[in-house]
Amino acid sequence: MTLFNQFKETGRMEDLEESIVLHRDALELCPPGHPLRSSSFINLGIGLLTRFEQTGRMEDLEESIALLRDALELRPPGHPHRSSSLHNLAIAVQTRFEKSSRPEDLEESLRKYEESADHVFSNTLTRLLMAARWAAFARSQRHASTLKAYRLALSLLESSLVISPTVQMQHKILSGKNGYPMLASVAASYAIEIGEVAQAVEMLEQGRALIWSQLRGLRTPMDRLAGVDKDLADRFLATSRELESLAISSELKPITLPTQDSATGASQKLVDEMYSRKRRLASHLEAIVAEIRALSGFEDFLRARRFSVLQEAAVEGPVIIISHSEYRSDALIVLYDRPPVSIELDSTFGKDCGLLFVNLKLALFRVQTEPNACDAGIRDVLRSLWDQVVSRVVDKLDELGVEKHTRIWWCPVRFLSALPFHAAGPIRVEDGRMDFLLDDYISSYTPTLTALINAREFKPEIRRHDNGRPRLLVVALPDESLPSVEEEYRAIQKDRDFVECLVGEQATREVVIDNFRDHQWVHFACHGKLNPEEPFLHAFRLHDKDRLTLLDIIQSNLPNAEFAFLSACHSAEQGLDGAIGEVLHLSAAMQFSGFRSVIGTMWVMADIDGPFVAKRFYRHMFAEEESSELGFKRSARALHGTIQRLRKRPGITVERWVNLIHIGA
């Protein structure tokens, strides 16, 4: 294929012509029965299809289709490369349809795409590519199979992660330039287009935060199943734990996907062994899940959740999903007692939202050197969010009868999750005072609807301090760059015997991890560090350059955890990598590990604000008159009240009061 590849690089027709001649000669040397005959058919067929694209000669296209049909005959169902053969034929027939508009070519092409995506003996990533192309072509022709194609593509995207051994490998699949991070939004946009808003919600849930969803599936509570079939529950748990252990292992550093260029020798052998073990365990788990689904009442065990289940996320207030794609942008309001509501946003928002993201980052780069420019830049972003999105959502909430000063949850997709919807505005200006969204609603965030549902699930009674208070662990690292941390941790500890502090040299990685398990609440007051290249290495900086990484956190299963306050820079900051829809930040990791409510920072936190925020916040959290409400659920209102106080302090710039956000229940 050297000459053909040369043509693709240089565009020299002489190279293409010569490659076609050579492929004809090669086919002559592969008579019927030869193991490479199907490959020769394909090579010549693709060469002729390429020449048609350059010259428009229909005889080349017709011969290409005939050759690709012959190749497919030699790759019957069950052949590992049948899917790619079906795909080649689908492309060729699609090309003829685009030239001649013959309806039979449209149907055949879509049928071949579907067969290719459905071929269970072929590589999962190949099938995923086929399903995505099937969906795109079917949509362009307004074909009835479009929704089915998107559904299959999302299912295959999940499957591709199931067979990827580690979270690092899963992340690489999702951060490639293949369009997969956009798949759920694109699929949902079609569902909305045809009036299937509930299905759009299901698709968005199924196709984002996939790494968290995969890991969460391996930590499924087994109490109900154990009551029906304990042996089956035990087998499921044992296999799930093996898979989880493999997924969050650190054996490959840096982790590499098994490609011809990136993994050779010992590294390749290790990767191959991990894939083999993952496939074996995944196959075993699939068989166990099939057994579980055969039991009465467990038919939907670990299936993608239906809207009727996802709707439970809105039991304490509406959840607003903000989605965008190349086709359209929408705000979807999920309500507990009625169908979801769709608000179509202006067509310009799809382009503007990317610019808002960039402008926010540019403004924050100037926080130290040009504070006034930073303040103005963030205000411009808040104003645009109000004008283009949030004002329409608020109008609809009013129309739906959602009361002011109640809780709402934001669930933005992809890089929209880096935008401060909770502080949009100003929504009005009265007597010289500017009001923002947080003056009318108490906002929280959630990476997915399932994450919010899980955060509210009942947990057995957990061990608390003798006075009934939750045991609170404070991890504090005061130094020259964080001089206010000492005042911050002392303010939390004052007159509270249920507060334990790990300060300075006490705060090592091992000690912090050990103490996690004995405390329901945790407060970090230290540096937070981002690792743009390896998000699983985002970390809290501890004593003597020690670090507690995102991977360390997700390796900790903390069933008794309730609440975490991450008073550290970047603890809820969405990175810039290709898998931005995965919400890979420290706050999300804490929530996954068991913390029901988490407070984090969207960017750098001003050290001087730590003591004031801590004093006000915990005063509200431990107020006796509030004791009837579950403590972790009190955190959203406590943060809301604290930020309102912070805003009124002299000299407080906008980036300081917008920064802190609440995630979870």
Image (tube, helix red, strand yellow):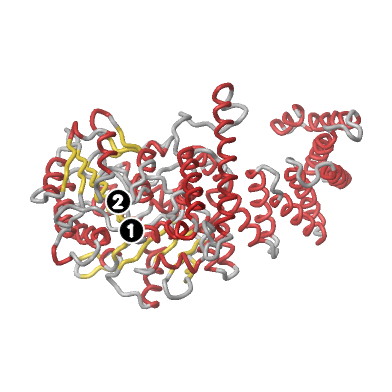
Q: CA distance from mark 2 to mark 1?
A: 10 Å
For disc 2, the marked residue is 561
Type of the residue with mark 1? Lys
Q: Residue at x 63, y 43 (%)?
A: 125
10 Å neighbourhood of mark 1: few (<14), some, or many (≥20)?
few
On screen, residue 270 versus residue 367, left or right, reads right
Q: Residue at x 27, y 39 (%)?
A: 514
Q: Quadrant of the N terminus?
A: top right
Type of the residue with mark 2? Ala
Q: Residue at x 89, y 45 (%)?
A: 59
Q: Are marks 2 and 1 in contact (CB under 8 Å)?
A: no
Disc 2 or 1, which lies upstream in sequence? 1
Identify the residue at the far top of this view.
265
Is 393 situated above or below 593? Answer: below
Instruction: Tell me where residue 381 appears, x and y as whole percent.
Output: 36, 55
Labelled disc at residue 459:
1
10 Å neighbourhood of mark 2: few (<14), some, or many (≥20)?
many
